[in-house]
Amino acid sequence: MHLHRYERIWLIIGGATLVIFLSVVGVQAFATDAHPPGSLVTVDPKTVTQEAPFNKPSLTQVGPKEYKAVMVARMFTFQPGTMEIPVGSTVHFQITSPDVVHGFEIAGTNVNMMVIPGHINRATYTFNHPGEYLIVCNEYCGTGHQVMAGKVVVK
Ligand code: CUA
């Protein structure tokens, strides 16, 4: 088979570029142990809701106007479903899923993350305005997806 000289040169350049790109992507994906943002802790989704703290999803006060919300997102509910806090409170959310990928979006805030089985996802938000904040699942998770919601009541 006869290849034109330029054809051969460009084939080599193309092949070399491919190798370089795949190496860069491969190093970033595997060697640096990349994670989804906000979920540096991994857990076993099969047992996570049987062990502390996710066996008792709850909102607890950890300081003056500071709360910790340990939450579970599952088909098709958030636990706890409703949380009440005084205005000006900062809430540290940590949430996991024992079943499928869910979403965790607090309407009217910048809190919006995926809840991934096997990971603990975290977000912190200070509620400076009173009102009812809807928590919605914004990842399609099955037949009950549209009813999956919770709320934060800020008084
Ligand atoms: Cu959970 Cu959609």
Image: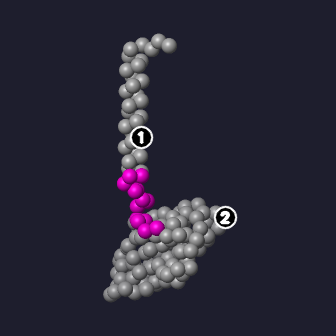
Q: Verify whether residue 40 appears in magenta.
A: yes
The residue shown at (36%, 79%) is: 90
The residue shown at (42%, 52%) is: 30
Say what secondary structure mark 2 lies in: loop
The magenta segment = 30-42
**Residue 86 badge:** none
Residue 74 visible in the snapshot: yes
Q: Is residue 84 above or below residue 123?
A: below
Tell me which secondary structure the magenta stretch mostly adopts. loop
Confirm or reject: label 2 Cβ below 8 Å from ligand 1.
no
Q: Verify whether residue 5 appears in magenta.
A: no
**Residue 22 badge:** 1
Closer-to-camera residue (127/22): 22
Say what secondary structure mark 1 lies in: helix
Closer-to-camera residue (1/10): 1
Frontmost of labels 1 and 2 is 1
Res 108 → quadrant: bottom left
Tell me which colouring the rendered structure shows. one colour
